[in-house]
Image (cartoon, helix red, strand yellow):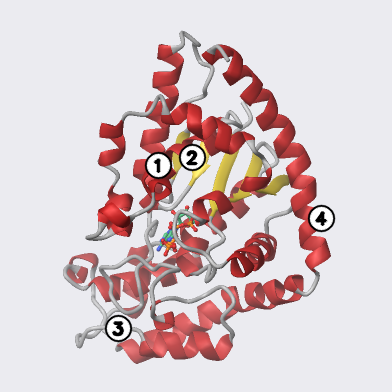
């Protein structure tokens, strides 16, 4: 059976190494497998759950497409489109919002983290975001969803919504129940300033992350300034306990090298951070440098990026509209 892959990235600017190692790198591998049918979505409806500047949002949408392409996603082998152009996403989200239970949504930890202390002031969209995410996935009969570890809970909710809809409307197997595809190791890349905090686009400090548009000098300077502890590098995995920054940097290195953590630990055992950081910077410059250059080149041809999105829209819209028509019939509209 062919795998139907669906995943999305929010066009909220500052796409970073966490997005790349946790999700986009996996998209590229899945896309290279001829057996898979892949859909990659720029999820702009999700982006407006927090305040956005409309001009920046528009340019971030193109930058996200440029990042997909520069990272190695082949637009001829996949569908790349912008979520808000396919109106079935919003329509399906409403129907699924009537299936999902508020008790389920109340358990979502990402909402708690993003809303912070002042939950009353968070948008309703931020709260119901996982329902829209379920609509995104289920409209395309997706079988597999590659995401970072932070999205695991939302994927579980999506599975619950699909199953409840199928039962409530006696529509056996109408929605496919998708499987998450989460990297076994390093599925959560942490901030360069705090090994206990996720690397994130919205972190106020640019030094907390490697942006995929950073140049060589920026990469080297960020790694040089990244937080570490005073001990030399560990001799074995057990010595990494309570050393979140060391674990994160060693994990990033392993992930870039497609190697395992044990091997990386062995290579750098007992060495000091400055030597390790030089190696890590070099690895980052080799991997991220070409992506950064390609993103900048692609952003110079807005017409090309828009064409990718309009081709993707045609294909995605056809699939989603058909599924939405069936949803409407099942529900009784
Ligand atoms: N730090 C991370 N480590 C591993 N994977 C990550 N992802 C995000 N951050 C990390 C994965 O990247 C994909 C796209 O994420 P997104 O843009 O849709 O939104 P997000 O998860 O909310 O990303 P950020 O950077 O944390 O954004 P802000 O700061 O706006 O909240 C997803 O598959 C995600 O798992």
116 in relation to 84, above or below: below
Distance Cα–Cα, label 1 vs label 3 = 35 Å
At 74% across and 32% down in the image, what residue appears?
318
- Left or right? Give the position of 10 relative to 151: right
Dot 4: what SS? helix
Asked if the residue at tag 4 contacts the one at tag 1, i.e. Cβ–Cβ closer than 8 Å, the answer is no
Residue 164 position in % (x across, y down): 39, 20
Q: Which residue is tagged 4? A: 307
Distance Cα–Cα, label 4 vs label 2 = 26 Å
Crowd band around label 2 with a 10 angstrom C-alpha radius: few (<14), some (14–19), many (20+):
many
At 43% across and 47% down in the image, what residue appears?
125
Asked if the residue at tag 2 contacts the one at tag 1, i.e. Cβ–Cβ closer than 8 Å, the answer is yes
Asked if the residue at tag 3 contacts the one at tag 4, i.e. Cβ–Cβ closer than 8 Å, the answer is no
Q: Which of marks 1 and 4 is in front?
A: 1
Q: Which residue is tagged 3? A: 227
- Left or right? Give the position of 166 relative to 43: left
Asked if the residue at tag 3 contacts the one at tag 1, i.e. Cβ–Cβ closer than 8 Å, the answer is no
Distance Cα–Cα, label 1 vs label 4 = 31 Å
Please tell me which of labels 1 and 4 falls first in the chain. Answer: 1
Residue 274 position in % (x across, y down): 35, 91
Any mark on residue 132, and which?
A: 2
At 35% across and 64% down in the image, what residue appears?
261
The reply to whether residue 53 is visible in this rendering is yes
Distance Cα–Cα, label 1 vs label 2 = 7 Å
Distance Cα–Cα, label 2 vs label 3 = 37 Å
Distance Cα–Cα, label 4 vs label 3 = 42 Å
Pick the residue in front: 210 or 72. Answer: 210
């Amino acid at each position: 059976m062919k795998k139907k892959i669906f995943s999305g990235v929010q066009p909220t600017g500052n796409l970073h190494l966490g997005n790349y190692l946790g999700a986009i790198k996996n998209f590229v591998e899945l896309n290279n497998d001829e057996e898979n049918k892949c859909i990659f979505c720029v999820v702009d409806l999700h982006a407006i759950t927090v305040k956005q500047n409309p001009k920046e949002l528009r340019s971030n949408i193109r930058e996200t497409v440029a990042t997909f392409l520069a990272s190695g996603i082949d637009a001829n082998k996949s569908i790349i489109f912008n979520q808000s152009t396919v109106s079935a996403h919003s329509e399906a989200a409403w129907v699924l919002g009537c299936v999902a239970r508020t008790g389920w949504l109340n358990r979502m930890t990402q909402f708690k983290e993003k809303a912070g202390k002042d939950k009353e002031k968070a948008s309703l969209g931020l709260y119901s975001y996982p329902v829209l995410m379920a609509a995104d996935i289920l409209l395309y009969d997706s079988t597999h969803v590659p995401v970072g570890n932070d999205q695991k809970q939302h994927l579980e909710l999506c599975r619950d919504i699909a199953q409840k809809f199928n039962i409530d409307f006696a529509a056996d197997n109408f929605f496919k129940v998708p499987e998450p595809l989460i990297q076994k190791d390093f599925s959560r890349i942490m901030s360069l300033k705090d090994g206990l905090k996720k690397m994130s686009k919205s972190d106020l400090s640019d030094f907390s992350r490697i942006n995929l548009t950073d140049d060589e000098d920026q990469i080297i300077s960020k790694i040089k300034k990244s937080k570490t502890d005073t001990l030399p590098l560990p001799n074995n995995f057990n010595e990494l306990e309570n050393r979140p920054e060391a674990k994160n940097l060693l994990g990033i290195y392993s992930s870039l090298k497609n190697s395992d953590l044990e091997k990386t630990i062995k290579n750098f055992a007992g060495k000091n951070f400055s030597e390790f950081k030089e190696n890590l910077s070099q690895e980052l410059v080799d991997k991220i440098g070409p992506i950064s250059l390609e993103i900048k080149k692609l952003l110079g041809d807005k017409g090309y990026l828009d064409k990718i999105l309009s081709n993707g829209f045609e294909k995605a819209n056809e699939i989603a509209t058909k599924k939405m028509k069936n949803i409407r019939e099942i529900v009784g509209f």
